[in-house]
């Protein structure tokens, strides 16, 4: 497991409400563990609700169950945002928030360039390794987070299961709540 990997919640692990059908990008790996953001679950908030300085309406996603009162962001415009941390090629985490606000209001940063999150997903090293051993997650090292991912997040989990085929095809078409079948 390393920074830039993408985790897809295994469909057989439906008991964890926070991560059911989640797609998580790992943005940090260190001696203590891992940090990631759920990239496919929109929160009920937008930037207009929480950041009055931003005059545009950007969706805010539920990044995970940790520090839900804090706002985080990933982006693909490090040339516009100083102090960005590279996650993988063409994808960055954080940076100078004043520049973010300024560039959004001047329409230099658009919705296909940035994704906001309330909270993050965090694991200590042993915890995530145990979850991987028990097959709670499907790991992808090669999937790209691109402009399409920033905008077309709804089907990320389903599309990955379809790509994997086999037993995953059945799960990809099942309702999120099996009682609604």
Image (cartoon, rainbow, N blue to C red):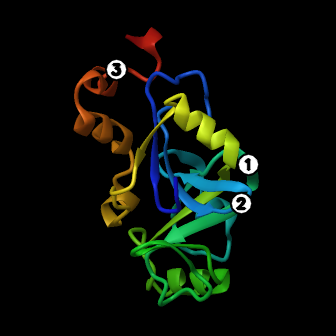
Residue 63 drawn at (x, y percent): 60, 51
Which residue matches tag 2? 31
Q: At 66% from the left edge and 53% from the top edge, which residue is drawn? A: 120
Residue 35 drawn at (x, y percent): 64, 56
Callout 1 crowding tier (Cα within 10 Å): few <14, some 14–19, many ≥20? some
Residue 65 drawn at (x, y percent): 69, 43
Callout 3 crowding tier (Cα within 10 Å): few <14, some 14–19, many ≥20? few
Give the CA distance from mark 2 to mark 3: 38 Å
Which residue matches tag 3? 174
Q: At 31% from the left edge and 60% from the top edge, which residue is drawn? A: 148
Q: Secondary structure at mark 3?
A: loop
Considering only vertical position in the picture, is 171 above or below 111?
above
Between disc 2 and disc 1, the foreground one is 2
| Image position of 97 (left or right of 147) | right
Callout 2 crowding tier (Cα within 10 Å): few <14, some 14–19, many ≥20? few
Q: Which mark is first along the chain, 3 or 1?
A: 1
Front-most of residues 179 and 102: 179
Q: Which mark is first along the chain, 1 or 2?
A: 2
Give the CA distance from mark 2 to mark 1: 19 Å
Q: At 67% from the left edge and 62% from the top edge, which residue is drawn? A: 30
Residue 84 drawn at (x, y percent): 58, 81
Does the rendering let one see residue 52? Answer: yes
């Amino acid at each position: 497991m390393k920074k830039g990997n993408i985790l897809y919640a295994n469909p057989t692990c439906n008991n964890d409400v926070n991560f059911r059908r989640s797609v998580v990008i790992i943005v940090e790996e260190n001696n203590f563990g891992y940090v990631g953001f759920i990239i496919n679950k929109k929160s009920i908030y937008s930037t207009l609700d929480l950041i009055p300085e931003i005059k545009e309406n950007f969706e805010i996603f539920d990044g995970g169950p940790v520090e839900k009162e804090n706002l985080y962001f990933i982006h693909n415009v490090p040339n516009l945002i100083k102090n960005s941390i590279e996650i993988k090629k063409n994808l960055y985490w954080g940076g100078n928030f004043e520049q973010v606000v300024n560039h959004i209001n001047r329409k230099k940063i658009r919705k296909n360039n940035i994704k906001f999150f309330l909270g993050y997903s965090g694991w200590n090293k042993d915890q995530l390794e145990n979850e991987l051993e028990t097959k709670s997650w499907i790991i992808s090292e090669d999937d790209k987070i691109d402009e399409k991912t920033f905008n077309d997040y709804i089907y990320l989990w389903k599309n990955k299961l379809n790509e994997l085929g086999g037993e995953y095809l059945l799960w990809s078409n099942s309702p999120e709540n099996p009682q609604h079948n």
